[in-house]
Amino acid sequence: MKVMKYCNSPNCRNLIEQYKNFCEEHKNKTSKSYEEWRNKHMPEYIKFYKSTAWQKKRVQALRRDEWICQDCAAEGIITVAQEVHHIVETKHDWSKRLELDNLISLCRTHHDRRHNR
C-alpha cells in the first residue's frame, strides 16, 4: 500500500504519493510560476545553463556515462540519457555546479522523478 499525503498547493485536497510535492492539476502551474520567478530573480542561474562551460561539462558527463540513463541501467534497462542532473542541486551548493562527480546522466522520466515532477 502506498503512503499518501495532500498536495502542497494551498487548499488542494488531492491525495498524492508521499515523495511527490504536487498533484497532476498543480504540478505544471507550480513549475511554470517557479520558472518565471527564477528567470526574474536568478539571472546568474539562467546565464549558467547557457554557458559554454556548462555545455562542455554536460557533454563530458553524458560521454562518461555512455549516453545511458544511470537510473535505468541500475534497473537493468538501457535507455538513452537526455538530461544531466546535479546530484547536489545548484540551489543547495552553487560551487558544485561544474563538478563531474556531482553530475549523473538520466532519461527525462528519471530526471522528472528526481525533481518530483
Image (spheres, grey):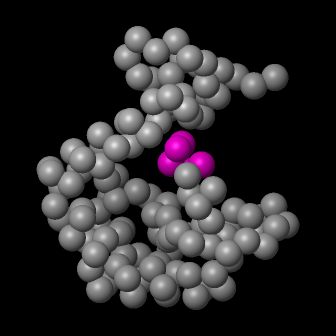
Viewport quadrant of the N terminus: top right
57 vs 78: above or below = below
Residue 27: horizontal and vertical position, in percent? 47, 36
Please name whichever residue, 3 or 100, is drawn nearer the observer in this view of the structure. Answer: 3
Residue 80: horizontal and vertical position, in percent? 68, 75
Name the residue rendered at 24%, 62% in the picture: 45
Residue 17: horizontal and vertical position, in percent? 64, 28
In the image: residue 8, left or right of residue 91: right
Residue 91: horizontal and vertical position, in percent? 31, 53
Q: Main secondary structure of the magenta part?
A: loop
70 vs 9: above or below = below
In the image: residue 14, left or right of residue 57: right
Name the residue rendered at 52%, 12% in the picture: 13
Q: Which residues are magenta?
A: 113-117
Name the residue rendered at 60%, 18% in the picture: 15
Taking the magenta stretch, the answer to whether it contains residue 86 is: no
72 vs 33: above or below = below
61 vs 107: above or below = below
Choose top left, top right, bottom left or bottom right for residue 14: top right
Name the residue rendered at 65%, 21% in the picture: 4
